[in-house]
Amino acid sequence: MQKITYLLITIFIMHLITLANITIFNGDWNGLVMAVNTILLVLAFGLVLPIKSKMKVSN
């Protein structure tokens, strides 16, 4: 799979976690959800930034 696919999957997981927190737990775990979403966001950027830097070098 391409790295951009992992980025889209990560964003989907972030939204799914937030939706579950709101609907199932009534927002009780906001701190944990924000921490998990932040970790996922950092991982997603870690996958995408090397792609952008390779694109700049090759152009």
Image: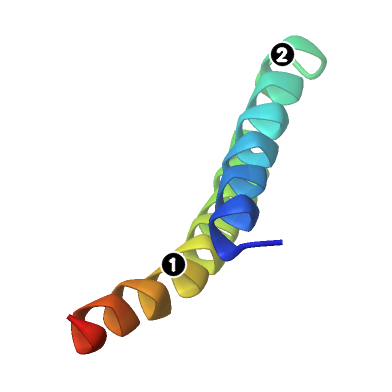
Which residue reaches farthest front? Answer: 59
Q: In this view, does 55 lie to the left or right of 17?
A: left
Residue 53 sits above or below residue 39 on the image: below
Q: How far across and down, in percent of the image, does residue 7 sit?
A: 56, 53
Residue corresponding to mark 2: 26
Q: Which of 30 and 1 is in front in this view?
A: 1
Residue 30 sits above or below residue 5 on the image: above
Residue corresponding to mark 1: 48
Q: Nearer the viewer, residue 4 or 27?
A: 4
Residue drawn at the location 65% of the way across and 21% of the way down: 27
Asked if the residue at tag 2 contacts the one at tag 1, i.e. Cβ–Cβ closer than 8 Å, the answer is no
Residue drawn at the location 40% of the way across and 80% of the way down: 50
Which secondary structure, mark 1?
helix
Quarter of the image where one finds residue 23: top right
Q: Few, some or many C-alpha atoms within 10 Å of disc 2 (few <14, some 14-19, many ≥20)?
A: few
Which secondary structure, mark 2?
loop
Q: How is the image coloured?
A: rainbow
Q: How far across and down, in percent of the image, does residue 21 sit?
A: 72, 24
